[in-house]
Amino acid sequence: MSIVNEIKAKTILRKHKKIDSWFISRYGMNFYRGCSHNCIYCDGRAEKYNVEGEFGKQVAVKKNAIEVLRRELDIRKRLPLIRGFMMIGGGVGDSYQPLESTYEVTRRALELMLELDFPVSVLTKSTLVERDIDILKKIDEKSSAIVSFSFSSMDERLSAIFEPGVPPPAERLASIRKLKDRGLICGMFLMPVIPFLTDTPEMIEQSVRCAKESGVDFIIFSGMTLKEGRQHEYFMDVLLDHYPELSIEYQHIYDGNKWGGASEAYYQSIHHTFYHVARKYRMPVRIPAAVYADIMNDNDKVVVMLEQIDYLLKLRGAKSPYGYAAYSVSKLDQPISKMKNHLRQLKGVGKVTESLILEILQTGRSSYLQRLMEFR
Ligand code: SF4
């Protein structure tokens, strides 16, 4: 049982500096601080997020969230908001953790999104999201909705150790199948994979195969971070209880990087494995353009597509100039269509990038991105 604190939030919407090409989102929101799912690797535990109390046991509920959100989303004052998906999830508390069945804050937020006509993307580890299929369907019919589940693997035993408050992987997969049967777009966030436990080629392949069989539309993959302090200590205590022989391996790859990242060589090796498995199963490794192209303005669409191309090239071990070009476009303070005869003035935009951008502006799509996404 969690200890619940009801709090009043001053703000709910979290604005990113630029469109986020993982989630295709400029705005995110959380209704809970802390999470009784209590994943051992959760970085919500890190000091930098200032979550008060014992993480995993104490959860704060933003009781006035909907009132604040309605004010923040006032559509007449905030037209520029309409870019990409409203992201519900991530951060320091799952929006469908058990308390949600009592407080229903996430459900009421979805009702508000439906009323105000915002596309929504939900990320959760909980099967409770099935309760809201009715509203998600209506949002999808009016604008667009994506529901994604995160997993560290398909292994029930490892999940019970490292995700003690979360429904087992098989139940999350069953939820995906139900949502797919209702025609919703579903993603898998295969993140974080846990070093030396769920990051092996066999485990990654099992996850991708199960995702494919469940009808998932895309998989987003990432390794684990361990920030020094509370997150690192908590994780290592549990690791030592169950897998003491691995602690030395962890010391080698987590060497005090200030963001909690593992070594570059380690990340390259797991991404290399993931690339080959995803290719084998022809699984899109980013949200496909067909899902988002019609709900975004040109600038954000160009940024997202260039960043996706950049990721896909790097994933296959190639160099890419497109991340830098995307950054330049994200800094523009005018519609990119007004610059279409002067694109080469943008830093990082050469002849090839110029032609890519022009195709996106003319057709709303990129045939190069499509080819990379299909592993051609
Ligand atoms: S579900 Fe997400 S927010 Fe909750 S404990 Fe797990 S990783 Fe953290």
Image (spheres, rainbow, N blue to C red):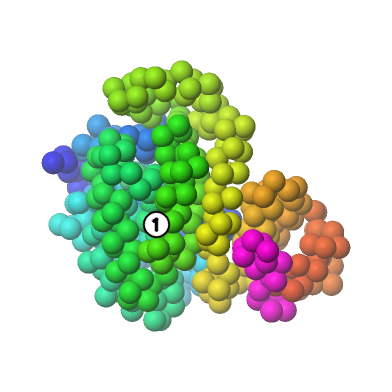
Q: Determine if the magenta segment contains residue 366.
A: yes
Q: Determine if the magenta segment contains residue 372.
A: yes
Image quarter where ligand 1 lies: top left
Q: Is mark 1 within 8 Å of ligand 1?
A: no
Circle 1: element type: helix
> For the point 42% across and 51% down, which residue is it?
207
Left or right: 349, with 63 as reference point:
right
Question: What amino acid is labelled 1 in the image?
Answer: Cys
Which of the two residues, 352 or 312, is positioned nearer the viewer here?
312
Q: Quadrant of residue 115?
A: bottom left
Quadrant where the image shows the N terminus: top left
Quadrant where the image shows the C terminus: bottom right
Which of the two residues, 48 or 272, is positioned nearer the viewer here?
272
Which of the two residues, 201 or 133, is positioned nearer the viewer here?
201
- Residue 320 shows up from this direction: yes
Q: Position of residue 168 (x, y in %)?
A: 26, 49
Left or right: 332, with 140 as reference point:
right
Q: Which residue bears the numbered disc 1?
A: 210
Residues in magenta, as a range:
361-376
> For the point 86% across and 63% down, which residue is it?
351
Q: Quadrant of residue 171?
A: bottom left
- Residue 49 shows up from this direction: no
> For the point 39% across and 57% down, which residue is it?
210
Number of residue marks: 1
Q: What secondary structure prevails in the magenta region?
A: helix
